[in-house]
Amino acid sequence: MSRRYTTLVVAAVSLIVLTSVALLVPVPYVTMSPGPAFDTLGSPRIAGGKPLLTFGDDVKTYPTTGSLDFTTVSVTRPDSQVSIVDAIRSYADKDVAVVPKSLVYPDDESEKESSAQSAAQLASSKDASKVAALRAAGYDVPGRPVIAAVVKDGAAAGKLESGDIVTSVDGTEVTSSDAVVKAVGSVEPGDTVEVGIERKGTPRTVSIVTRADPQDPDVPRLGISIGTKFSFPIKVDNNVGREIGGPSAGSMFALAIYDKLTPGQLTGGKTIAGTGEISADGVVGAIGGVRQKMAGAAEAKATIFLVPAANCAEAADGDDHGLKLVKITKLDDAISSLEALAKDPKAKVPSCS
């Protein structure tokens, strides 16, 4: 065997080996594929055999038909390995997205950290959807500013605790988290503020010396995060299990609660699907994976898909899977559009197309 022939053989074998190895080497991407859809008006398996929504014995509810489905996305776990072959195969599937891992799991987030964050987002979404739905149905749902967390070694460390209700700042009553932020922001870094709180039903006042924001020395900080503690007038339980997480089912939770508490049927007997984060004041926010959620909705035989306004361009860019894409900005938009379509399937409503 000549030296040249031997060299060619070795080079060819090396190329094959290197190519094979390269195809198996993990790449920093994750895949997003259509997940299942779950009926908020029914008893999906993720509710543990219960109806997804249950109400207090003294709460009047109304019968419904059809389905209000929230949609999901199946995402590669942060500790999973996606090879080049897997990425190419997924990229060829029009219903699967291949995205940089850092966009889904920032800072090399672990599966445990991701699950914890997702669960916290879901819990917040459940509360926000209840508030928005009850208010839309005519109930008064008051809220009070509450300390959600205290930064370790921050200005308020040892003085404020998670769960404290904030009642005043420098003697001025505050009734919302925005009011707390505005009141604290009106002083200079280094100034002392008197924060009135209610802890376990007992009122008290604490003095806290503000500190400058590390990113902006002109902005005063207490080293806390503020949330809202709501007082619900009726009992509404969301029994969704731990199989899902994140905030994107909020708008569909809210629609289902509203539908149960008001006469008539939002669905018109049809299968309606959708997505969208929701705030307590009923504003619908953008979500990720709208194309995958549309595919999941079509698989569930939905005919109408509710799309957050901020996701409309993405939703309309490709196969609509035979879905009518209804654009929603607020919970009221979704309610009025569904009521119109229930009466007349050809009714003109805000659309993404």
Image: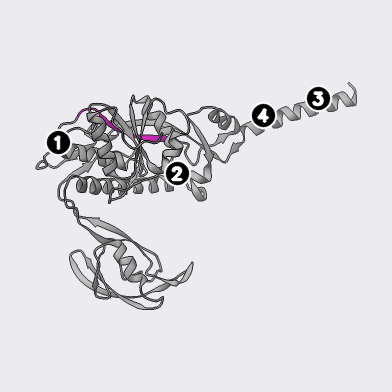
Mark 3 or 1: in front is: 1
The reply to whether callout 4 and callout 2 are in contact (CB within 8 Å) is no
On the image, numbered disc 2 is attached to which residue?
Answer: 111
Query: What's the magenta region?
Result: 65-74
* Secondary structure state at the residue bearing disc 1: loop
Residue type, numbered disc 3: Val
- Sequence-wise, which precedes: disc 3 or disc 4? 3
| Secondary structure under the numbered disc 3 in the rendered image | helix
Instruction: From the viewer's side, name the closer residue of 183 and 223.
Output: 183
Quadrant of the image occupied by residue 67: top left
* Viewer-closest of 104 and 4: 104
- The image's mark for residue 20 is 4
- Outermost residue on the left side: it is 58
Q: Are marks 3 and 4 in contact (CB under 8 Å)?
A: no
Question: Does residue 201 appear in this view?
Answer: yes
Q: How much space separates mark 2 and mark 1, taking CA atoms?
A: 43 Å
Q: Main secondary structure of the magenta part?
A: strand
Sequence-wise, the earlier of marks 3 and 2 is 3
Residue receiving disc 1 = 263
Q: Residues within 10 Å of mark 2 (few under 14, many from 20)?
A: some
Quadrant of the image occupied by residue 39: top left
Give the spatial CA distance, label 3 vs label 4. 17 Å
Find out whether the residues at labels 3 and 2 contact each other: C-beta distance under 8 Å. no
Which mark, by number, is residue 9? 3
Mark 3 nearby-residue class (10 Å; few <14, some 14–19, many ≥20): few
Residue 267 placement (x, y as % from top left): 24, 31
> Which percent across, then down, holds residue 246?
37, 44
Q: Give, as a three-letter code, the residue at label 1.
A: Pro
Q: Secondary structure at mark 4?
A: helix
Q: Residue at x 56, y 32 (%)?
A: 87
Does residue 329 show up magenta in the picture?
A: no
Q: Secondary structure at mark 2?
A: helix
